[in-house]
Image (tube, rainbow, N blue to C red):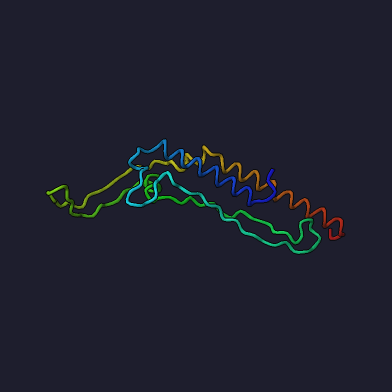
Amino acid sequence: MYDNEKDVAQKAERMLQTSLRSQAASSFKEHILKTNKGKKRLRDAVVKATVRKYANRLDGVSNAGKETFYLNEIKVKMNKAGFVQHYGVDNVREGHWRQQQKTSYFVKPHNFKMRATPWIDGAIQRSDVLNFISTEVAKIRMKNVVIYIKNSLEQGKI
């Protein structure tokens, strides 16, 4: 049982981040997962939750004066290659010069298509984070509603 939404957010971050990293490691070959010139690796995906903090008013609520946390969003941050792999590409690549050892040549503009591999959706489903968040946040908010109604009845406001 979780006392506030901040604890739920932290648990959800860990669940989704673990699932994303394991899905990346199992879905892609090593050359996609390696570090390239100081860039972050695809398997270094980070999940960050945004939780807003509010102070309760002193109006007879049992947790008056304490802080209340509300989970607003969960973001996935990773190398752009991860999102390109997830959504795919249908684009025209610009012409450019290539050089291999001593030979250089011009590559004409051409169509570039990469089919989508929805690996982020798979990681979200595998982690079951949506069910966890909806269940735990509903329990916490319902508990606060019951406490508010109880205190309002005791004070004669209802």
Residue at (50%, 44%) from the top-left corner? 17
Residue farthest toward the bottom in the current orientation of the protein: 58
Check the picture and name the quadrant holding the N terminus: top right
Residue at (25%, 52%) from the top-left corner? 93
Residue farthest toward the front in the current orientation of the protein: 38
Residue at (74%, 49%) from the top-left corner? 143
**Place of residue 4 in the rendered image (x, y in percent of width and height, measured from the top left):** 68, 51
Q: Is residue 4 left or right of residue 40?
A: right
**Place of residue 55 in the rendered image (x, y in percent of width and height, measured from the top left):** 70, 62
156 up-or-down from 134: above or below: below
Residue farthest toward the left in the current orientation of the protein: 103
Residue farthest toward the top in the current orientation of the protein: 26
Residue at (59%, 45%) from the top-left corner? 11
**Place of residue 67 in the rendered image (x, y in percent of width and height, measured from the top left):** 69, 59
Check the picture and name the quadrant holding the C terminus: bottom right
Q: Is residue 137 left or right of residue 149?
A: left
**Along the line of sight, the residue nearer the viewer: 50 or 14:** 14
**Place of residue 89 in the rendered image (x, y in percent of width and height, measured from the top left):** 33, 48
Count the marks: 0
Q: Is residue 120 left or right of residue 53?
A: left
